[in-house]
Image (cartoon, coloured by chain):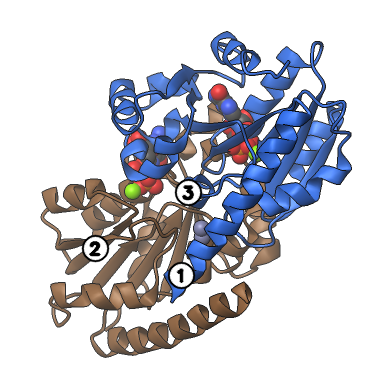
Chain colours: A blue, B brown
Amino acid sequence: MEIKVVRQILEWNEDCHKELQQLFNEKKILVLNVMGSPGGGKTTFITRVIEALRSDYNIGVIEADIAGQIDAEKMQEMGIPVVQLNTDGACHTEAMSIKNMLPYFDLDKLDLLIIENIGNLVCPAEFDIGEDLKISLLSVPEGDDKVEKYPLMFTRSNALIISKYDMKEYFNFDENRVIENAKKLNDSINIFKVNSAKGQGLDGVIDYIKAYIKK
Amino acid sequence: MEIKVVRQILEWNEDCHKELQQLFNEKKILVLNVMGSPGGGKTTFITRVIEALRSDYNIGVIEADIAGQIDAEKMQEMGIPVVQLNTDGACHTEAMSIKNMLPYFDLDKLDLLIIENIGNLVCPAEFDIGEDLKISLLSVPEGDDKVEKYPLMFTRSNALIISKYDMKEYFNFDENRVIENAKKLNDSINIFKVNSAKGQGLDGVIDYIKAYIKK
Ligand SMILES: Nc1nc2c(ncn2[C@@H]2O[C@H](COP(=O)(O)OP(=O)(O)O)[C@@H](O)[C@H]2O)c(=O)[nH]1
Ligand SMILES: Nc1nc2c(ncn2[C@@H]2O[C@H](COP(=O)(O)OP(=O)(O)O)[C@@H](O)[C@H]2O)c(=O)[nH]1
Ligand SMILES: [Mg+2]
Ligand SMILES: [Mg+2]
Ligand SMILES: [Zn+2]
Ligand SMILES: [Zn+2]
């Protein structure tokens, strides 16, 4: 019984995802679904992407959180159009919620819409939300076993960002274990290593994102 | 519709939770529900608790993970009775799953049962699983805003462990922000700071746990 309900939600979600993808293609908006653990470095990474691309492209952000608007305020301080989506307890974002946020943006002007998903390595991986690319972060302090423990996230991601790479010297983090396991799950995954705190090592992933901007 | 289903699951869960609590009281087993983000330091912390208490008490562990048995193997290497519970995608543990694991333990012998929940700051907070104490970890690299962003976890926890406290010098982590916000949500929460990697600062939380052992 429970499973049927969940399946149905996933089907409705997939229909709405496809509708959104079509809209974003018509409007030529590249959409990123940024996922990872709480504190994995999503917001800091997004601010670096914005800094690198804002002079050439119009960027908007949707911040999803259980509660509060801490990250949305950071985007607002940067002068970026942002909407806060509060899931009020839910552990993931659904396509319908993203659709409901769109009236707050001028879609004819946007080139890039970045969605920061709920900090969670589990359920966000199941729900497509109209994105072109799923980008998941794994931070060095989380440990090198997380790809094996949360396989769906890395199976479904287009890119894996190893964040807080500057912390490598303080943790027993076998980067090859992470890379090998991610490639075993998903041999087309693109892997990058960044220090978003200091803004180092981001060129590769910025170029990767730029290549998907819709013309 | 969706909400009704979820509510019903929570009610069934609560009945099973109470049944388990009664059983664990009869058998004089202290049960800890250890929660936190992926990589927050749950397993490392649990090994330190075991090291400190294993000469005086019989300890068992249930390891909950989406997939795999990485942490269960660590417990087995320590010679501790352990069962791996794989949720096969679910983002939290329920009381019924814990009940199903009990035949694997000799309940007449156990003094302490430690349950490592799924790495997730959201849904595990909603489900009581027969525990006496909910212990949640927040690691310094995750950032000082996580209590505000995941309020239910810290509202419902008996203890908050600030883990990877040795990493404080590398992160802009305002510990007072964490403590104040946790106490605002839950003024009876017990807060400890630990470095489980090096086994430092654990005496306070070990004494705290010991005080709950059932006689
Ligand atoms: N050293 C270091 N710290 C980082 C990096 N990225 C993020 N952080 C820090 O990690 C904490 C959580 O970052 P945040 O971007 O809020 O993570 P989010 O919860 O995933 O959005 C903050 O203290 C950040 O300053 C990084 O690449 N290196
Ligand atoms: N520096 C430091 N590292 C820690 C501490 N606790 C855990 N770690 C490291 O953090 C990573 C994740 O720890 P783990 O216990 O597996 O986290 P879990 O996923 O919550 O069970 C591993 O690399 C651990 O060695 C700590 O207190 N200090
Ligand atoms: Mg964030
Ligand atoms: Mg663990
Ligand atoms: Zn979930
Ligand atoms: Zn959940």
Residue behind label 3 places its C-beta within 8 angstroms of ligand 2: yes
Q: Is residue B123 above or below residue A155?
A: below
Choose mark 1 or mark 2, whichever is in front.
Answer: 1
Subunit that carries the residue with mark 1: A
Asked if residue A174 lies left or right of residue B175, the reply is left
B197 sits to left or right of B184: left
**Where B193 sits versus B102, above or below?**
above
Horizontal arrangement in the rendering, residue A103 relative to residue A95 (left or right) = right
Q: CA distance from mark 2 to mark 3?
A: 19 Å
Quarter of the image that includes the N terminus of chain A: bottom left
Q: State how far apart marks 1 and 2 are (Cα).
A: 32 Å
Image: A172 above or below A2: above
Q: Which quadrant holds the C terminus of chain A?
A: top right
Quarter of the render that holds ligand 3: top right
Whether residue B175 is visible, yes or no, is: no
Within 10 Å of the Cα at label 2, are there few (<14), some (14-19), or many (20+) other Cα atoms? many
> Which residue is pictured at 33% across the width and 57% down the height?
B88
* Residue receiving disc 1: A4
Q: Which residue is mark 3?
A: B37
Q: Nearer the viewer, mark 1 or mark 3?
A: 1
In the picture of the structure, the residue carrying the numbered disc 2 is B61
Q: Quadrant of residue B70?
A: top left
Residue B34 higher or lower than A108, as above or below: below
Q: Give me the residue at 63% from left, 45% from top.
A: A17
